[in-house]
Image (cartoon, grey):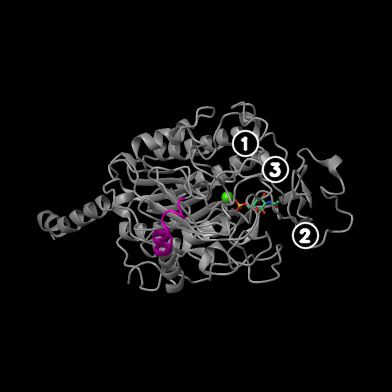
Amino acid sequence: MNRRQFLCASLPLLAQSRAAAAARLPNIVYMYADDLGYGDVSCYGATRVQTPNLDRAAAAGVRFTHAHSSSATCTPSRYSLLTGEYAWRHQGTGVLPGDASLIVQPGRYTLPAMLKEAGYRTGVVGKWHLGLGARNLDWNGEIAPGPLDVGFDYSFIFPATGDRVPCVFVENRRVVNLDPNDPIRVDYDHPFPGEPTGAANPELLKLQPSHGHDNSIVNGISRIGYMTGGKAARWVDEDMADTITGKAVSFLEQNRARPFFLYFATHDIHVPRVPHARFVGKTGMGPRGDAIAELDWSIGRILDTLDRLKLTRGTLFVFSSDNGPVVDDGYRDQAVEKLGDHKPAGPLRGGKYSAYDGGTRVPFVVRWPGGVKPGVSAAPLSQVDLLASFAALAGRKLPEDAAPDSFNLLPALLGKSSQGRPHIVEHATALSLIVDDWKVIQAHNGPKRNQTGNEIGNDPQPQLFNLANDLAEQNNVAAQYPAKVKEMLAMLAQIQQDGRSRPR
Ligand code: NG6
Ligand code: CA
C-alpha cells in the first residue's frame, strides 16, 4: 500500500475516531450532601454561612427550586436514587442500622449498572447506608454483597452513618487498615463487656449526646450501636471530609480518560458534626455551620479537580441533599444555641423526618458548561428521576420493569424545558402528593414533633395546601376543598397500588 492508498484507507477510521471523541458521553458526578436544608447554602438565600463553591456551580448551571429527595430520611432516598423506585414500596427500607444486610438486590437494574452498561466506569465514595452482606456479616473477611454487586466498579464507603458503628471505611470488599489481630465485632443489641459506652462513661466524651447516641465510644464520641476491635481501622471524624474527598479526587484522576460516573456522598453535614480544625469557627454558627463550610470546601475540591483535569466541559455535575435539615439530631453541638436567625429550611415548613416540604425539597444544582442552559428552574423533579434521565443522556432504553418510578426529565435537568414530573410523592412517616400547585398529606396518627423538635407532619386528618400562595404550608385548606382532597388521595392510592408510576 502506498502512502496515498494508506491515507485513503485510514481516513474513514480517523473520521470515526474523531466522531467518537466528539460524541464521548459526558462524565457524571453526583455529589450528595447529608441533611443539608433548602436554606443552608448561600445560593438558596443563606447569609450567615457562605458556600462560594456551590454558588459558582449554580451561577454557571441550573438552580432548581422544586427538586425533591424522595424521602425525608437517608436510606429510602438513596434506595430510590439508585433503583429509580420509591423506597416506600418495600418494607425494610427505613433508616438502617450499621449491621443491616444489603437492601438493593444484587444484579438489579440500578443507576450505576445502567451507566456501566453504557460504557461508564462507576464509583461510589462516602456514605452508603444501604446495608452490606447477606446476613451475619463478618467484618473481618470479604464484605459482600455490596456496592460492587449493584453496579459499581469501585467503592470507598462508610457503611451507614457517621453516628453508627462500625466507624470504619470499606474499600471494595475489605475494611481499610484492619489489623487481623484486632478483629472487629459489631452488635446493635448488646454492649461488649469491658468496653466503655457513652451511657456508662460520659466522662470519656468530647461531645455529649442530647438524645440516643450513648453506645460505643469511638474518637471520644458515643455512637448508635456497639463495636469492639478494629482500633487501627477506626476513622477520626475530624479527618473524614479530607479522607473521602481525597478518594473522590483520586477516582477522577484515575478515570479521566473514559466516561465515568462518580457518586460522592459526603458525611457533612450529618451528626456528629466534627469538622476539621481548618473550619472550626469559620461561620460563628458552631459545628453545624462550620460543617457547611467544610462541605463547600469539598465541592470546591471536586470542581477544581475537574478544571485541572480539563474535564469541566465534559462533565455533568449535579449536587443535592438526601433529605431536609435538622438542628439537634442527637448531640449537644451548639447547633441550637448558635442558630440565631439562620433558617435551615429557608421558607419551608418542617425539615428532616417531615412530610412538610422542608423534609424533601432540597438544594439541587446541575452544571454542565455547553450542555445546560444556565438559569433558575421551577420544574418539579425528584431524585428518583435521575436513573431514567441519565439513561436518556447515555442513550439507553430502560427495560420495562426497571426503575418503575423514574421519569426521563433530561430536558428539564439541562434547563431546556420547564416541564417537570406530573406529580411528586414525598415520603416521611406519612406520604404526600404534589400535583401542580396542590399538595395533600395523608392522614397519619403520631406525634406532631419528634425528639429533634422538627415537625413531622402527622395529623389524624388529611391536610391540603396550595403551594403557589402558601409555600410555607401554613394554611391547611382541606376543609374548604374536600373534592380536591378526595381526588388527590385517590390518585396517591392508585400510585401506591399500581406498584409503579412510570408510564409503560
Ligand atoms: C436517627 C438518629 C439520628 C440520625 C438518623 C438517620 C437517634 C436518636 N437518632 O435514628 O441521629 O442518625 O437516625 O439519619 O438515634 S439519616 O440522615 O441517615 O437518615
Ligand atoms: Ca440524611
Q: Secondary structure at mark 3?
A: loop
Q: Give the image location of residue 446, x and y in percent.
A: 64, 58
**Residue in the image at 71% along x and 42% along y:** 331
Q: For the image shown, how many numbered marks are present on the structure?
A: 3
Tag 1: amino acid: Arg
Q: CA distance from mark 3 to mark 1?
A: 18 Å
Would residue 72 appear left or right of 178 to someone viewing this image? left
Write down the residue under mark 1: 288
Q: Quadrant of residue 281?
A: top right
Write down the residue under mark 2: 183
Please tell me which of labels 2 and 3 falls first in the chain.
2
Magenta residues (range): 477-488
Please tell me which of labels 3 and 1 falls first in the chain.
3
Would residue 415 appear left or right of 319 to someone viewing this image? left
Tag 2: amino acid: Pro
Query: CB of residue at label 2: within 8 Å of ligand 1?
Result: no
Q: CA distance from mark 2 to mark 3?
A: 18 Å
Few, some or many C-alpha atoms within 10 Å of disc 2 (few <14, some 14-19, many ≥20)?
some
Find out whether residue 485 is within the magenta segment: yes
Q: Quadrant of residue 104?
A: bottom right
Q: Give the image location of residue 191, x and y in percent.
A: 83, 58
Q: Which mark is residue 236?
A: 3
